[in-house]
Image (cartoon, coloured by chain):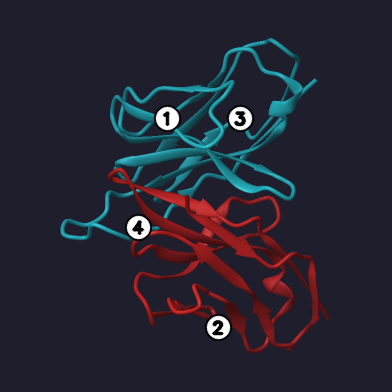
Chain colours: A cyan, B red
Amino acid sequence: EAQVTQNPRYLITVTGKKLTVTCSQNMNHEYMSWYRQDPGLGLRQIYYSMNVEVTDKGDVPEGYKVSRKEKRNFPLILESPSPNQTSLYFCASSPRAKAGFTTGGNEQFFGPGTRLTVL
Amino acid sequence: GNSVTQMEGPVTLSEEAFLTINCTYTATGYPSLFWYVQYPGEGLQLLLKATKADDKGSNKGFEATYRKETTSFHLEKGSVQVSDSAVYFCALSGDSGGYQKVTFGTGTKLQVIP
């Protein structure tokens, strides 16, 4: 089954304790992204990756790190979590736009979400 | 930069009522437009999309037409069901330095009552 998986689904931690949220996709997609969802703010992109070893900042990257050592995995790292990072996090993947299509975009496939609480 | 504005929720409707959720956008170039749906406790999933002006996306009785002249992509359904209760996100995907950056609206919660 084609899917994006995230672990853990729920996490409660304390300020300053490093944590990693894993994300894996089995669709051989080039693009992967991390988003956070907060009430009234919708989804905001944290980081994205266009391919292995290629990552870039999204709209709200402060306090987060990512890596893309393998095509299927895109972990999100919080080196020193703070309470303002309490949120619902989603990983997503999408295929590269088809050759010849220079505008527009492809569907994103989302993981089930990770609810993080930082005390 | 690109932006998406969608109507505030929550929207509460009786079963079989007509649904409209408004969405307008600001973007350069020719973005693709999407509606995603998020059921309780789940991630987002694509509901429908349109990739060029005047395209109509449709799925599960929902429809939306890409209107470039009004920069809109309103979601409609003729007769909603309780199972349609969810949060709906309008989104656009546009070129950003070779990457198809996706910008989401804030979401509209729909509650359908029997």
In the image, what residue type sits under mark 3?
A: Pro
- Chain holding disc 3: A
In the image, what residue type sits under mark 4?
A: Gly
Query: Image point 56% across, 69% down: which residue?
Result: B24
The verdict on a common chain for dots 2 and 4 is no
Decide: is B73 above or below A79. Answer: below
In the image, what residue type sits under mark 1?
A: Phe
**Kind of element beneath mark 3:** loop
Relative image position of residue A46 (x, y in whole percent): 52, 34
Closer to the chain start, of discs 1 and 3, is: 3
Residue named by callout 2? B61
Select label 4 or label 3 by which is in front.
4
Relative image position of residue B52 (x, y in whole percent): 34, 73
Residue named by callout 1? A74
Query: Image point 57% across, 24% down: which residue?
Result: A62
**Kind of element beneath mark 1:** loop
The verdict on a common chain for dots 1 and 4 is yes
Select label 2 or label 4 by which is in front.
4
Label 2 – label 4 distance at C-alpha: 23 Å
**Kind of element beneath mark 4:** loop
Decide: is B6 above or below A68. Answer: below
Label 1 – label 3 distance at C-alpha: 14 Å
The verdict on a common chain for dots 2 and 1 is no
The verdict on a common chain for dots 2 and 3 is no
Image disc number at residue A105: 4
